[in-house]
Image: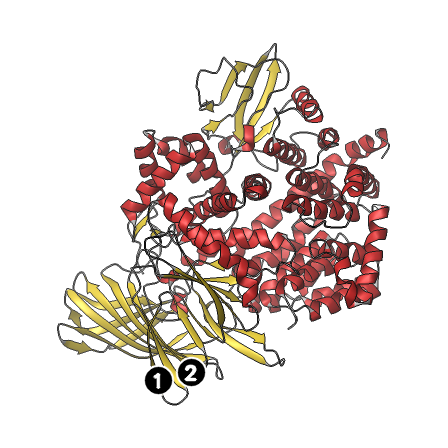
Amino acid sequence: MCNKASSNPNRVVLPTNVTPSHYNLTITPDFKEFTFDGYVEIDLSIHEPTKTVQINAKDLTLKSTSIETAGNTHEPVSTTHDEHHDTTTFTFEHELAKGSAVLRISFVGILSDKMAGFYRSSYKDAEGNTKYMGVTQFEATDARRAFPCWDEPAAKATYTIALVVDTDLVALSNMPVESITAVESDKKTVHFEKTPIMSTYLVAWAIGEFEYIETTTTKLEKPVTCRVYTLPGLKEQGRFALEITPKILEYFSEIFGTAYPLPKLDHLAVPDFDAGAMENWGLVTYRTVALLFDEKTSDLRFKEQVAGTVAHEIAHQWFGNLVTMEWWDHLWLNEGFATWVGTLAVDHLFPAWDTWSTFVVDDMQRGISLDSLRSSHPIEVPVADPHEIHQIFDAISYSKGASVIRMLSNWLTVDVFLAGIRRYLKKHEYENATTDDLWNALSEESKVDVREFMNTWTRVIGIPILNVTEADGIVTVEQHRFLSTNDVKAEEDETVWWVPLGVHPKPASIVDPNQTLKTRSLSFEVPEGAYLFNKHYGGVFRTNYPPSAISRIGKAILDGSDLVGLSDRAGLIADIASLSKSGHTATSNLLDLVQYFKNEETYVVWELLAGRVGEIASIFADDERVNQGIKHFQRNLVDRMVNKLGWEFPEGEDYLTSRLRNVILRSAGRAGHEATVAEAKRRFALFVSDPAHDSILHPSIRQTAFEIVLSQGGEEEFRHVLKYFHAAPKQDQQVIALLALGFVQQPELIAEVQALAISESVRPQDIFYVLAGLSANPASRRSTWEWVKANWTTLANRYKSSMSMLGACVKYPLSQSSDVSLIKEVKEFFADKDTKDFQRALDQALEGLDVNSAWLQREQEGLSEWLSVNKY
């Protein structure tokens, strides 16, 4: 290993004296023994004479190795393995001369079920027999599990791949099939065309009993064949994904100024899949629920999920595949941009969905919330060791990254921003790039030094809070670092961010037409009446208004003023809720604000209203007075909308109204709204009594109905939902059942749900659905943490190749708890355990516990008093 010269001199990477240019790879899987044979020839450039060649390899048995250089073949005199760094070093007797060489390695690998490298995924056929497919998942550093390689993003090369498979199986890879040759009576070798130059983590192949549906782009100079591959009987569920694929390819080809460079783009649904999806060039792989959607039986939310995921992965074909980050420090260039431009594409295709408002509620809040913790990290986070990489695939790289791009693109204008992106892609296509390269392209296009004001957003941890004060018609805004613990130390508060203020109505006294705050504070006059900062909620910061300003904004909302648009209303709730949780303002101020929303009828705003008020009830679950008072408040809040929307889904109803109905009924049910609970029970009884009554619970409210009856019922209801889970033919139906099962109240049933999480009935990837339900249920939180402790060895072994999943097992049971005693208990439990691969998740769980417990202790008395005064 060596420390490569870079912006991070501590990186642990391979030596650069030998580099690859082409891999000729053959893989032969054995689905009976769960192994695979491999043979690879790697064309090399030896840049200086050397006796050693070092590569990455993990869980591979190397059977033979030789290197050919200058017409001579040499075998290594020694081969050593470094298990910690996943490297193998070949030492040769004589120095290898500078020039070209070919490294040949024969090897054997394990076709495991750990969802990493080249692995197997199981499924049942129509007769109930267990079958297997094989698929790859290489990001971030698991190509080395499938073949010996230079497993780093900057070590780009071309690939020719051949798969030796049974004659009745379909083989897929990044490129189209070039030829098929018979091997023995029951085998064939499928040869694929040579790939463009690319990174190892984007190499992919899959083998199985696949079927497909197909279409072709019509607006590109070179048509692209688009397919959705599935297991038998599922292909029609890929119809929606197939319909949008050519539209997205054509849209991105236009706005990026570069056509999609491959002749085909396949999507593949995989039953067992760790991530949501993976952008392998030309062969994108997905969890089933992220790709397949049934118009008749699927919850509508999965349709938006499919659209967003497909758009995100197609965006990667340019941002990540065509131009690749130079090292994992710059992961956000892949994920933040794909999240932003994926949203842009969905908004382009489905403007009625109001996707950018949903972005404010979902992605922005995820990113801001995580970055409000000390245990967060900068967007550009130095990654030294590959073992650290998976821990930064989080809401900072994705959601905060996308939010910062949205803020910058709005300020520069989207047209100028995209012109800069075209410049960036053209300059660095088929190469690697850094964040500075992006800033350079945007600066050249906009004639503004983007780096000067954006480095604080990407290289510094945290976000600002703007504290607003009023005096004699003058408003002063002052920025500081925002922490959810509300205990910023002086040394943590040295950053002065560049902040687009977005003041509306625009004050005449602000000379800067772009209204940016570049200093610690700024004062100016504002017109009389209500005013807003962060108009359209485009800036990545919290705004802390004085009570008088909130009152004026609230009255403007009540009056239906155009001043406070949809994103503004959503952002205001998000900010005040976060500020009340952190102690910057009283939680009663949030409840006062909510009452101004009694005429609100939009999905996006209600998602936040219901969620933030529900969070109070959840965190204060052990305070009977506050918990019951807040639920009374919730029931009053939702009553009008429950009566307005009801349980039926009229034909032709718009998408957002359908989503709103579920939000309202879920909030009403969790608050114990009598009519909602009664109707849920009535419909559930009909639903389980006769298959003919299937339509009585529309797929988009089925999970909500299940939650309500389980939280209000007993074993009979539990058995019905458990039966539904086991019998569900589609994975999205299984998901809603798993999420709902966690809402049971009886200890013996809670224990059964916990056991289900690691049973053979639940795919390992789906454990977090079970934990999410159990964590949202106050009756099961504590016991779920106890269950995690009791089953830690099992969990650690099960997810040793998927540390992000293990981190979720730590975070979920603690995420909504306010029990301060758990902080010490959690620390003691992990004191003698190796936590390096999920340390960030553990730190964030502990800090979240600290925030929740402080909120509870600080606000119990004040909330109880407010509820009494307001007769709740």
Q: Is residue 172 visible?
A: yes
Residue at the image point whose x is 61% and y is 50% from the top: 845
Residue at (76, 55) in percent of width and height: 705
The residue labelled by disc 1 is 182
Q: Nearer the viewer, residue 866 or 489?
A: 866
Q: Which residue is mark 2?
A: 167
Q: Amino acid at mark 2?
A: Thr
Q: Amino acid at mark 1?
A: Ala
Q: Quadrant of the C terminus?
A: top right
Residue toward you, 851 or 285? 285
First of labels 1, 2 by sequence position: 2
Give the quarter of the image for residue 131. bottom right
Closest to the observer, 69 or 574: 574
Task: Tell me the SS state at disc 1.
Answer: strand
Which secondary structure, mark 2? Answer: loop
Do the numbered discs 1 and 2 sit on residues whose CB atoms are within 8 Å? Answer: yes
Direction from residue 443 to residue 576 in the image, left or right: right
Q: Is residue 825 left or right of residue 429?
A: right
Residue at 22 percent across and 66 percent down: it is 44
Q: Is residue 214 left or right of residue 179?
A: right
- With respect to residue 338, does 65 lie above or below? below
Q: Position of residue 578 (x, y in %)?
A: 64, 36
* Vertical order, 253 against 176 (above or below): above
